[in-house]
Image (cartoon, rainbow, N blue to C red):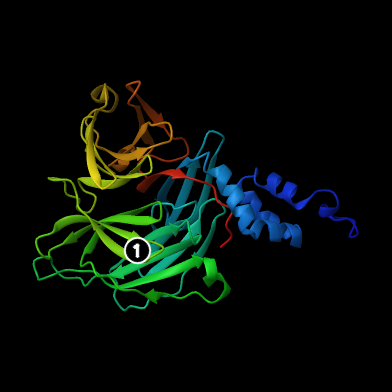
Amino acid sequence: MENNPQIRSSDYLPEDLIAQILARLPSKYVAKLIVVSKLWSSIIRSKSFIDLYLERSLTRPCLLFSFHRINRRFFHSISQEAISEEATPDYNVCTPVRGLICCQNLDKVVVSNPSTGQFLVLPKLNTKRKQISRFFGYDPIEDEYKVLCMTVLQVSYDYGSVVSEEHQVFTLGGTEKKKEATWRMITCNVPHCPTTEGICIDGVVYYGAWSNSKNRGSLIVGFDVRLEEFTLVKLPDGVEIYYSLDSELVNYQRKLAVANLSYRGKFELWVLDKQEWSKISVMVPSWKYLFGRALFRCRGAISSGEFIFTPLLSAWASVIISYDRKEEIARRVEVEGIEDRAHYMKVFLDHVECPILL
């Protein structure tokens, strides 16, 4: 077809059928097909195609591995069909949101698509400070991704109140695609200092925080991506979350949960449902014989209901553990292609391929 300028692909296939065919391809190949023709480029960049592609991808979630090697950060996505790998400059990585990730290196913030290998460097933040916290979320109503950043003065917790300042938001998609997007200052009426990474669930970004005002101590902050408002979420009695050392936030069946560090296969999971916390106590059988005294973190549960554990120490970097609570079966999975002792190894659940071009 390409050798005859008078013949077009649309003469043979309707656009909706082309879209259906393209939606079945890996996203890294879809990104390359925008050069085939103006028609294909228009289809691939359209919101209807992106929604169609993500609708299929959401039924095939996979694990995303991120690790550092020789000043580069690599990504492995593992599904039932294949393992893929992409590399980007080394950055600190946020939890993936609907196929995209947000990374940070000092004061540089980047949004990347691991499936296509593309990345977008955002404009410089409106700050002179170096201590920056960043979070990434998606608003399903307005169909917008947003990056939230804030700064904190580098002072001791013993020296008066420590709170985040200079709260800024950058929007990707929606109406701001039609004009030059910039960082916007927003108001935060909840004094706090972020201490953990964030997780986005149903349009709200949650993260652990510290507040030394009015004896609040450890707490969870929720940032509504659409309304750009902050709220406080009280932790269960006796549960604290500081810098992800003992506990961290996870997604458990699309609900916010707090999981503590697993020691010898025993851990507790606190699940928030309708503003009430409930506790799930889990004891993984045969842990000592399979994994010895190694420390693992619970990363949440996949669609089958299995809990996924990842190692705390780099010596176990190529190992993940799955535990089926109903069947009481634990499995040790060796991940090929990831070297042992890989530095800054991270594992994310429910990652999906995304065709969005940055």
The reply, left or right, for residue 137 in relation to residue 81 is left
Question: Image point 49% across, 62% down: which residue?
Answer: 142
The reply, left or right, for residue 217 in relation to residue 152 is left
Number of other residues with Cα within 10 Å of mark 1, as a class: few under 14, some 14 to 19, many 20 or more: many
Report whether residue 8 is seen: yes
The residue that mark 1 highlights is: 134
* Element under disc 1: strand
**96 or 67, nearer to the observer:** 96
Could you tell me residue 241's position as x and y percent? Answer: 20, 50
Q: Is residue 285 above or below residue 37?
A: above
Could you tell me residue 129's position as x and y percent? Answer: 29, 75
Question: Image point 46% across, 35% down: which residue?
Answer: 336
Question: Image point 48% across, 55% down: which residue?
Answer: 100
The reply, left or right, for residue 214 in relation to residue 69 is left
Q: Is residue 52 above or below residue 338?
A: below
Q: Is residue 356 above or below residue 310?
A: below
> Residue 192, located in which quarter of the rendered image?
bottom left
Question: Image point 13% across, 59% down: which residue?
Answer: 216
Could you tell me residue 214's position as x and y percent? Answer: 10, 64
Could you tell me residue 31's position as x and y percent? Answer: 63, 55
**30 or 18, nearer to the observer:** 18
Image quadrant holding the C terminus, namely bottom right
Q: Is residue 157 above or below residue 255?
A: below
